[in-house]
Amino acid sequence: MKADPVISLATRQRLEKAARAAAGASYSPYSKFPVGAAVLADSGRIYSGCNVENASYGLCNCAERTAIFTATAAGERKIQAVAVYTPTARPTAPCGACRQVINEFGAHAAVICVCNSSQRIETTLPALLGEAFGPQNLLNASRRPVRHKVR
Ligand code: THU
């Protein structure tokens, strides 16, 4: 089993700061629930994002996914940690869809959720998403997609 990533206090603080700053750009006129997120990629770089809502509500994109897609578009493929900030009294953990997207790039990622009080959640993706479905379910040893037989 792979060990959880060790992230220094200074890096964690930078990540949290980036998540807090990202919430400032949140486009959330419908929910009025701004969220900021930041991810630490294997390169050491930090990418941030906010939730982006839409008049067609189902198209809303969470802050975590905005940050992860931004990192992916920059060429990153591995994520060590995710920080989420909401301007609430209690921390907010990533929604189920975002847990699945985090799993794609950071199956062992640390997940840190901060808010406007001193309350925080410090956990890991495996703790939030047990028995996850991921790339390993689709790839064989040669890492080519396997054609499954349906019966
Ligand atoms: N939201 C996030 O950005 N991240 C979460 O982890 C939970 C929910 C957003 C989606 C939507 O814009 C608003 O919060 C209310 O659900």
Image: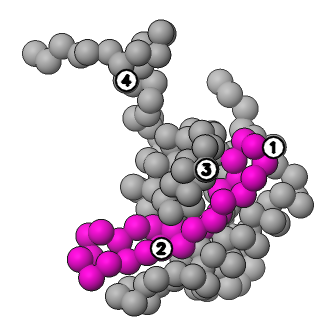
Q: CA distance from mark 1 to mark 3?
A: 23 Å
Mark 3 lies on residue: 74
Q: Is residue 128 above or below residue 135?
A: below
N-terminal of the pair, mark 4 or mark 3, is 3
> Is residue 93 among the parts visible in the rendering?
no
State the mark number for residue 51: 2
Q: CA distance from mark 1 to mark 4?
A: 28 Å
Give the amino acid type for the residue marked by disc 1 in the picture: Val
Give the amino acid type for the residue marked by disc 2 in the picture: Asn
N-terminal of the pair, mark 2 or mark 4, is 2
Residue 76, percent across and down? 63, 43
Q: Nearer the viewer, residue 44 or 96?
A: 44
> On the picture, is 114 further left or further right than 101?
right
Q: Is mark 2 within 8 Å of ligand 1?
A: yes
Q: Is residue 127 above or below residue 21?
A: above
Secondary structure type for disc 4: loop
Determine the residue located farthest toward the top in the rendered image: 142
Q: CA distance from mark 3 to mark 2?
A: 19 Å
Q: Is residue 142 rendered magenta in the image?
A: no
Residue 5, percent across and down? 75, 41
Label 4 Cα neighbours within 10 Å, binned few <14 / some 14-19 / many ≥20: few
N-terminal of the pair, mark 1 or mark 3, is 1
Q: Is mark 4 within 8 Å of ligand 1?
A: no
